[in-house]
Image: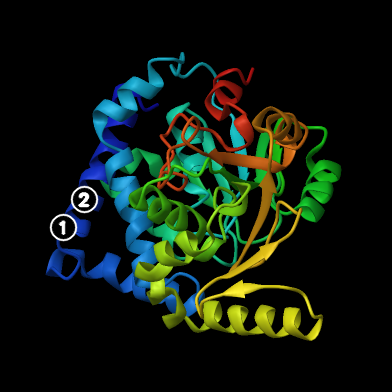
Amino acid sequence: MISLSDRIEAFHALGTRLSAFVEDPNSEQNSTIKADVTLAFHKNGWFDEREVLHAIAYWADALQKPNLLDWLSNYDAAVKSTKKVAVVAAGNIPLVGFHDVMCVLLSGHKAMIKCSSSDEILLPLFLNLLKEAEPRFEDLIELIPFKLEGFDAVIATGSNNSARHFQQYFGKYPSIIRKNRTGIAILDGTESAAELKGLIEDAYRYYGLGCRNITKLYLPKDFDLNKIFEASVPFAYLMENKKFANNYTYHKTLMMMENRPILENELLLLVENASLYSPVSVLNYEYYADIAQLNEKIEAELDHIQCVVSKTNTPFGMAQKPTINQYADGVDTMMFLTNLA
């Protein structure tokens, strides 16, 4: 049995190892990690080196011991009864499933992990590095290539459609089942150039594929949309990714064929649309006149919203940098796990 302090030390050691890689990714000692970063891109064209390095840098910072201690101080994570917890991991952005696995292991349980086919390199890489730091985790980590069986509880993340199947299959077990959500931003018209640049970061980090990415803007009447385009200029590198560029061309062409009004700058497409969700390369927007009425409207949509970026909510530029105590869908994963009988 691994004590809580040893578990914390292991994750801190992983953070330190990742920090060394971020500082010098081309060093000889980091060759294995570097090779897997390259392989991840060959397996999934969305996982290019820039985005994967951003994800690794995030975890290098998040796994520092003060962060871990502060987070876990809110729970009784002493091992009472080790359970087998199935984790059906998403793969829409690099390492998105790692937080769930970390919660399982830090709460003293065994993780039975079904990796997404979209992220079958990076998550196992992190787990191997973790086992190097603490070999006793070998008995608490199992990658499941086929059907999940013999588990006591489950954490599953997927689309709305897959969530329905998860509910049918896992419904009789203690479970957390997540489905589609997205991010929105509320602007008041006084945003600085730096904040607007942060807004574009929130929309297009990981090419906009994450549930915390901004897909919908709420703008005050008479907002100058040129400010959005100006803020997007530093992100021209997005078009270097063929998958993103193809999405841009496809959606632009489709909307033009449908005679839908669009605004674009050969990088992003702005579309006035009431929907919270927008496809890759497209950013929906909607004007509002009364902030109180807008807040009521958003309140009614909270089941579809993962993150709200504004001057009074998540700061601009921070949508894809949640603290480790910010849980997907607002469901406290650690509380769920530490309460398993």
Q: Amino acid at mark 1?
A: Glu
Q: Residues within 10 Å of mark 2 (few under 14, many from 20)?
A: many
- On screen, residue 166 versus residue 267, left or right, reads right
Residue projecting furthest to the front: 222
Image position, residue 115 (x, y; %): 57, 57
Viewer can see residue 120: no
Contact between marks 1 and 2 (CB within 8 A): the answer is: yes
Which residue: 57% across, 75% down? 264
Q: Which residue is mark 2?
A: 19
How far apart are the two marked residues, 1 and 2, measured between alpha carbons?
6 Å
Q: Residue at x 39, y 21 (%)?
A: 72
Kind of element beneath mark 2: helix
Amino acid type, callout 2: Ser
Task: Give the vertical position of 230 relative to 133 (above or below).
Answer: below
Q: Looking at the rendering, in which quadrant would you find the C terminus?
A: top right
Pick the front one: 81 or 292: 292
Q: Quarter-wise, where is residue 237 in the image?
A: bottom left
Q: Residue at x 78, y 51 (%)?
A: 160
Residue 302: x %, y % from top left:
71, 35
Which residue is painted at 51% across and 57% down in the image?
Answer: 203
Q: Find disc 1 in the rendering and name its residue.
A: 23
Q: How many marks?
A: 2
Q: Which of the two residues, 317 or 86, is positioned nearer the viewer here? A: 317
Q: Nearer the viewer, residue 181 or 259?
A: 259
In the rendered structure, the answer to whether residue 243 lies left or right of residue 271 reads left
Up-down: is 337 above or below 104? above
Quadrant containing the N terminus in the rendered view: top left
Residue 54 coordinates in the image, percent (x, y): 34, 58
Element assignment for label 1: helix
* Quadrant of residue 134 within the rendered picture: top left
